[in-house]
Image (cartoon, coloured by chain):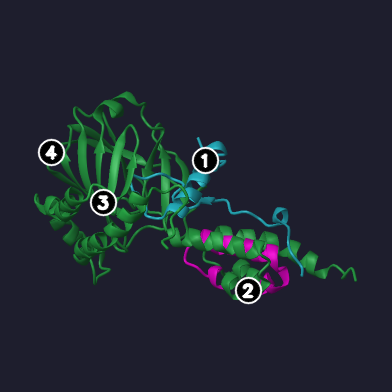
Chain colours: A green, B cyan
């Protein structure tokens, strides 16, 4: 007997099953164009060829359109997002590159107030504006943020000359040092964007549009955030036997993850974490971690020196 | 087992939010992670970092 999610219509559940082989075969096609390399330049070259071939997307989508014609319940393998401003679909989400298609509504873009911040996303993107909508692109440049990034010392982002986006333009943006906002379009904007993953910066940053001041940063690497969440889970679960996991994460290239791992470890098993905390205080390449570890070490030592209540 | 309370652990001057807390025109393919991120964004918007303008 087939098992069905509560509330799921039988037609939908069966259509999902029917869609799977079509989608698997389709996904193997475009993904293959980017397989076998993690060389950012080569991926960029292939992505450029993909984006600038006028028939590429139509050919790409044809098998799925055919499947939809044959079966109205067919589910294409796209992650789709939609709000009043933008409708987007991820055409390919591979380990090295993501290709997405978006339509931005000009009326909504012109109606909305200017965003308060601009994002410097940390990745190189290539965008082919199939329809540019004569939109104005405002561009900001920021210094590169490495593993020693400090909010207190972050220089403001500088706005540079804006450009107008015309139909057919291919725009390369190095999101490690630039961010942009599209404003005031004459017509809807249709864009195909390739986001190149190798060589990405560790952080995604936000700067104030008004004066370029640094506002905040987020981790650009989802695996680092997953590790952080899993370490919290281990600590909440009382898994003191997972010390090697905390130790390993305290040596991760992402500085914020190193300290997050140490915080979790200290809240779980201070005695086991003590030697690594002392190492961080003395030798970590990030000055803020050295300062935080040095400030925490005396508090831990006081706890460790307290007489056993038994 | 000796544990150190959160209040006695120093924080970094540079706070880094979870991946996805800053929105970019990019969609990931993981529903559970996205749900967590949606919660993170909510918290982040309600309690912005001290360096927010």
Q: Given the current orientation, which residue lies at the most extreme front position?
A: A1
Query: Of the residues tagged 2 and 3, which is closer to the observer?
Result: 3
**Dot 2 falls on which chain?**
A
Residues rendered magenta in the picture: A248-275
Task: Indicate which label's residue lies in the foreground, 1 or 4.
Answer: 1
Query: Closer to the camera: disc 2 or disc 1?
Result: 1
In front of the other: A265 or A215: A265
Element assignment for label 3:
loop
Q: Nearer the viewer, mark 3 or mark 4?
A: 3
Circles 1 and 4, Cβ within 8 Å, touching? The answer is no
Residue drawn 77% across the image and 70% down it: B1
Disc marking residue A74: 3
Q: Chain of mark 4?
A: A
Residue designated by label 4: A167
Between marks 1 and 4, how big is the CA–CA gap? 36 Å
Instruction: Name the side, left or right, on which A108 lies relative to A310.
Output: left
The alpha-carbon separation of the residues under discs 2 and 3 comes to: 47 Å
Label 1: which residue?
B42
The residue singled out by tag 2 in the image is A243
Q: Answer with mark 4 or mark 2, whichever residue precedes in sequence.
A: 4
Q: CA distance from mark 3 to mark 1?
A: 34 Å
The percent position of residue A171, horizontal first and vertical second, equals 19, 46
């Amino acid at each position: 007997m087939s098992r069905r999610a509560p509330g799921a219509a039988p037609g939908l559940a069966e259509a999902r099953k029917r869609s799977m082989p079509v989608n698997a075969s389709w996904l193997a096609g475009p993904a293959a164009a980017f397989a076998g390399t993690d060389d950012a330049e080569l991926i960029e070259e292939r992505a450029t060829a993909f984006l600038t071939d006028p028939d590429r997307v139509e050919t790409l989508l044809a098998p799925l359109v055919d499947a939809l014609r044959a079966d109205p319940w067919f589910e294409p393998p796209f992650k789709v997002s939609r709000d009043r401003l933008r409708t987007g679909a991820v055409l390919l989400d591979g380990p090295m590159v993501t290709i997405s298609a978006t339509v931005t509504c000009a009326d909504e873009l012109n109606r909305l107030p200017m965003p308060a911040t601009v994002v410097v996303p940390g990745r190189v993107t290539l965008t082919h504006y199939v329809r540019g909508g004569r939109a104005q692109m405002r561009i900001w440049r920021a210094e590169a943020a490495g593993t020693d990034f400090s909010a207190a010392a972050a220089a403001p982002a500088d706005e540079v000359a804006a450009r107008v986006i015309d139909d057919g333009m291919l725009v390369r943006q190095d999101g490690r040092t630039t961010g942009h906002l599209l404003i005031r379009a004459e017509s809807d904007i249709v864009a195909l964007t390739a986001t190149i993953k190798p060589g990405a910066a560790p952080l995604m940053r936000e700067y104030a549009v008004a004066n370029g001041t640094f506002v905040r940063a987020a981790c650009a690497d989802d695996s680092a955030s997953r590790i952080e969440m899993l370490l919290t889970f281990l600590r909440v679960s009382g898994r003191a036997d997972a010390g090697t996991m905390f130790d390993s994460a305290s040596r991760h290239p992402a500085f914020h993850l190193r300290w997050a791992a140490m915080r979790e470890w200290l809240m779980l098993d201070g005695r086991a974490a003590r030697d690594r905390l002392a190492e961080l205080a003395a030798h970590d390449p990030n000055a803020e971690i050295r300062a935080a570890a040095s400030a925490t070490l005396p508090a831990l030592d006081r706890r460790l020196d307290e007489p056993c209540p038994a | 087992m000796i544990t150190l309370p959160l209040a006695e652990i120093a924080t970094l001057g540079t706070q880094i939010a979870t991946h996805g807390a800053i929105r970019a025109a990019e969609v990931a393919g993981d529903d559970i992670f996205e749900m967590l991120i949606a919660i993170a964004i909510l918290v982040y918007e309600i309690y912005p970092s001290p360096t927010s303008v």
